[in-house]
Amino acid sequence: MKKDTPSAPVKPTDVIGGIFTARRDLLHGVRAVVAGSGFSVEEADLLISLYGAKKLDWDDLEHDKKGFVAFGELERYLVHNPSLLSRRIKKLASARPPLCEVAEADLASGQHPNAKRVRITKEGIKRIEPVWKRYQQMAATLLDCIPQRDLQTHYHVNAKISERIRQRRDGLNDLFSGTA
């Protein structure tokens, strides 16, 4: 969405529309980052998420001390198309050597008995680390000319948007009904 005049107040639809536009445009860079890895964008998203849980101890993807993540958590976390998640996990787990491993539900943590968990293997880490490094390089290059205060503001606005959506996830329709 384009503004007619740069000094006009920014509308909420401009902010949200800008996020969608940035996501669309970023996909080109993400495809370049993943190129040559042997992974689809969706597979790389899955492995980077598992890498973040296991190696980087990301706090926004719920995982146990061993790096296992529930399938349901991954579905809500993935940036790129989470459909066919089970098939992707099965493909990566059946690779030789396996890139991820699947475990049964953790009943002690309250998981449903039919739920599964997954974590990245050492081979998966070895294969996805170069992709993660290229992603970091792309991000640094893309943002290198933007002042730190603008980056902080953008980061905080996005975090607030995500926080509000997560708080209302069960009642998400309230956001669109005009009652929120």
Image: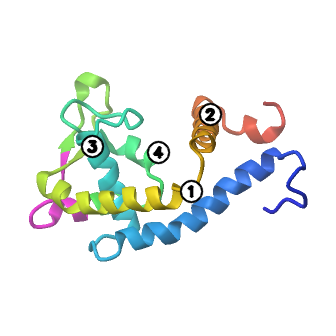
Residue 99 included in the magenta stretch of the image? yes
**What's the residue at 44%, 66% (across, down)?**
30
The mark nearer the N terminus, 2 or 1, is 1
- Alpha carbons under labels 4 and 3: distance apart: 15 Å
The disc placed on residue 116 is 3
Q: Nearer the viewer, mark 2 or mark 3?
A: 2
Q: Which residue type does callout 3 highlight? A: Lys
**What's the residue at 78%, 30% (across, down)?**
180
**What's the residue at 32%, 57% (across, down)?**
132
Q: Which residue is mark 2?
A: 160
Give the x, y percent position of residue 105.
24, 36
Asked if the residue under mark 3 is in contact with the one under mark 2, i.e. CB atoms within 8 Å, the reply is no
The disc placed on residue 76 is 4
Q: Which residue type does callout 1 highlight? A: Cys
- Alpha carbons under labels 4 and 1: distance apart: 32 Å
Q: Nearer the viewer, mark 1 or mark 3?
A: 1
Front residue (pair 67, 4) = 4
Q: Which residue is mark 1?
A: 145
Asked if the residue under mark 2 is in contact with the one under mark 4, i.e. CB atoms within 8 Å, the reply is no
- Alpha carbons under labels 2 and 1: distance apart: 24 Å
Q: Nearer the viewer, mark 4 or mark 3?
A: 4
The residues colored magenta run: 90-102
| Secondary element at tag 2 | helix
Give the x, y percent position of residue 53.
29, 40
Q: Which residue type does callout 4 highlight? A: Arg
Give the x, y percent position of residue 57.
29, 35
The answer to whether 6 appears left or right of 55 in the picture is right
Q: Nearer the viewer, mark 4 or mark 1?
A: 1
Residue 55 included in the magenta stretch of the image? no
Front residue (pair 170, 80) = 80
The mark nearer the N terminus, 2 or 3, is 3
